[in-house]
Each structure stands twice: as structure tokens, then as C-alpha cells.
């Protein structure tokens, strides 16, 4: 059984070698790797060319962001099961073997399979919690943030539902929730993938400096499911689930903007959150924004 791997990448030549090497070190050998270069201006193409393996395919496209890049990768593969890998993450050697064994032994119906994920930031290593499938799997996905590196999806599912090219933030959870509302979700309780959190990465950079356009994009993606996919989630999620989810994201960004001393950004996030849903919490946050402007009430780092 062949398993396809898809890596979208943009100007990650400095770390892409480690990611590709982790695929070459797999103990399961029947795989293909498609690397979608999303308009890189660095040495990405040269890095890929340095690996002489017929199973690796390089595809260049003009910059169109990660959702479009992953979708192009899907179109360039033929395997029944497709896995995703971010270009700064790595797979442990048994990752594909564990997936292949699960598929061959359990014969799962078309759906989504998640493996365990380790997050690594410098010397700090943490194991993320597994999905508790005995609970509401949609809520589990929404709260535990599956990343593409730990996910494998059946081709028939991805022929119907793909990454929404309008979004470059929360685009993965947007897809996983649509899939989970229609197909089975499986959890393999083995840690086989590593997410590298580093200074140049999207997650770290996104928290070091909050950008209002990122907050708007994140919230817009959630609103899209709330407003345009109502029938898909009816009876599967609690009433007002997406509104509460939006509240939690505004709180996250508002807190981080305050800690970053981004007074103007924090103020605009507060206004957007208030327009979404006024609350006592937001009333209590307003004086904190002002106090933080004068370095009062900030947490030590």
C-alpha cells in the first residue's frame, strides 16, 4: 500500500532538509513525497534537488498560500491515503509504519486518522493530548488543534472536501471539522510526529506580534463554518458553539496583544470582540488595556 506525503513550503530552505530527511528515514518504504514550493525566493529548489530519490516530486507554483499549495499536492498524488507534513516539522522513523499497520489491520472506512504529536520548542518537549473519541469528536478537534503533520486522510474524502483557499489561518481545523462532521475519525495513540516551534515559525511569530489582519482572518474562518455550513453541523455541536469559540479566540489574541504592549492592536481587538458579543469579561478587560499601556499589570517573562 502506497502512502502519499505532501509538504507545502515557502522560503524554508534553512530547515527543509531535516523535514525531507525524516521522510527518507521512514521504516515503511512504500511512499511518495510531493513538495509544493509556494513561490519561494530562497534556495528551496536547490535543497530539494540535493535529494536523489525517485519517490520525491518537486512542484513550483506562484505564491498562493498554504491551502492552495496543499490542494495542489493532493492533485499531484494518486495514493489512497494522503498524509501532510509541514516544512519545519519532522516525522519519527515509525510514523508511516504505524499508519500503514493501522490501515491494513483495522481496515478503516474512509475518514481521518490522527497520530500523536510531540511539540518541541528549544529544549522544551511536550506531548499533546490525544483526541478522546468517546466524547464529541468535533469539540475535541476544535480544542486540541490537530496540525497537518499528524493527520492522514483518505483520498475519497479529499476529493470532496479540501483546504479552503480563502484562509491561511485555522485553515486546517476548518477542514478537519468539515471532515469530522461527515466521516469517521480515528486516533492512533502513538507519538510519531514532532511539531517544531521556532522563532521563524508561524505560531511563534504570530504571538510575538499580533496583527489585526490575522485576528480578522482567524475569526472569519470560524464564522464561515457558523454561517455557511449550518446544516453540516446541526445536531453535532452545542448551540452557539462557534460564537463561544470566537469569544475564546478574541480573548487569546487580546491577552497576548496586551502582554506585547500593543496598545492600539489590543484596543481594536477589544472593539471587534465587543461588536461580536458584549460581555462582562470585556468590560473588565478595558481598564487592563489602559493600565498595560503604562506597564502596569503585565506578566513577567
Image: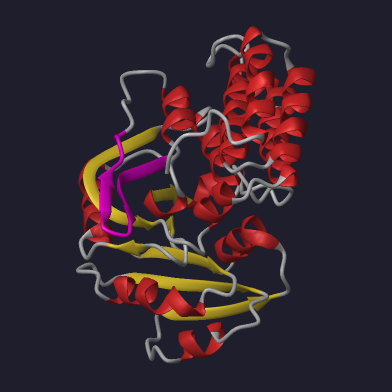
- Where is residue 89? Give x, y as percent: 39, 62
Residue in the foreground of this view, choosing between 250 and 158: 250
Q: Is residue 280 left or right of residue 94?
A: right
Q: Is residue 235 left or right of residue 119?
A: right
Q: Quadrant of residue 24?
A: bottom left
Q: Quadrant of residue 287?
A: top right
Magenta stretch: includes residue 125: yes
- Where is residue 69? Give x, y as percent: 62, 63
Can residue 164 be seen here? The reply is yes
- Where is residue 176? Give x, y as percent: 51, 38
Q: Residue at x 49, y 72 (%)?
A: 34
Can residue 78 be seen here? The reply is no
Q: Residue at x 61, y 45 (%)?
A: 171
Above or below: residue 221 compared with residue 275: below
Q: Residue at x 80, y 19 (%)?
A: 275
Magenta stretch: includes residue 119: yes
- Where is residue 38? Give x, y as percent: 64, 71
How many tags in the picture? 0
Residue in the foreground of this view, choosing between 211 and 240: 211
Q: Is residue 132 left or right of residue 149?
A: left
Above or below: residue 240 compared with residue 55: above
Q: Main SS type for the magenta part?
A: strand
Residue in the foreground of this view, choosing between 97 and 119: 119
> Which quadrant: the C terminus?
top left
Above or below: residue 69 compared with residue 52: above
Above or below: residue 151 compared with residue 39: above
Q: Bounds of the magenta span?
A: 112-130
Amino acid at each position: 500500500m502506497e502512502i502519499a506525503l505532501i509538504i507545502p513550503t515557502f522560503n524554508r530552505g534553512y530547515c527543509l532538509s531535516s523535514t525531507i530527511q525524516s521522510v527518507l528515514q521512514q521504516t515503511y518504504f512504500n511512499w511518495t513525497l510531493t513538495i509544493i514550493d509556494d513561490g519561494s525566493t530562497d534556495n528551496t529548489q536547490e535543497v530539494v534537488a540535493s535529494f536523489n530519490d525517485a519517490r520525491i516530486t518537486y512542484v513550483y507554483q506562484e505564491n498562493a498560500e498554504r491551502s492552495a499549495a496543499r490542494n495542489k499536492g493532493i492533485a499531484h498524488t494518486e495514493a489512497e491515503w494522503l498524509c501532510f507534513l509541514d516544512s519545519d516539522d519532522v516525522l519519527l522513523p515509525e510514523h508511516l509504519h504505524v499508519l500503514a499497520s493501522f490501515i491494513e489491520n483495522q481496515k478503516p472506512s474512509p475518514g481521518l486518522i490522527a497520530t500523536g504529536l510531540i511539540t518541541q520548542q528549544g529544549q522544551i518537549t511536550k506531548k499533546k493530548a490525544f483526541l478522546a473519541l468517546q466524547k464529541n469528536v468535533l469539540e475535541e478537534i476544535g480544542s486540541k488543534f490537530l496540525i497537518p503533520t499528524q493527520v492522514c486522510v483518505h483520498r475519497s474524502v479529499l476529493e470532496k472536501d479540501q483546504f479552503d483557499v480563502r484562509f491561511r489561518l485555522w485553515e486546517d481545523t476548518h477542514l478537519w471539522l468539515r471532515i469530522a462532521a461527515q466521516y469517521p475519525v480515528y486516533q492512533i495513540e502513538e507519538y510519531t510526529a514532532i511539531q517544531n516551534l521556532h522563532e521563524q515559525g508561524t505560531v511563534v511569530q504570530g504571538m510575538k506580534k499580533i496583527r489585526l489582519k490575522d485576528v480578522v482572518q482567524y475569526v472569519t474562518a470560524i464564522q464561515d463554518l457558523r454561517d455557511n455550513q449550518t446544516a453540516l453541523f446541526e445536531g453535532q455541536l452545542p448551540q452557539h458553539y462557534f460564537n463561544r469559540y470566537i469569544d475564546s479566540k478574541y480573548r487569546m489574541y487580546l491577552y497576548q496583544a496586551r502582554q506585547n504592549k500593543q496598545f492600539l492592536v489590543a484596543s481594536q481587538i477589544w472593539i471587534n470582540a465587543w461588536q461580536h458579543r458584549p460581555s462582562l469579561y470585556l468590560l473588565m478587560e478595558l481598564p487592563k488595556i489602559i493600565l498595560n499601556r503604562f506597564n502596569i499589570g503585565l506578566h513577567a517573562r
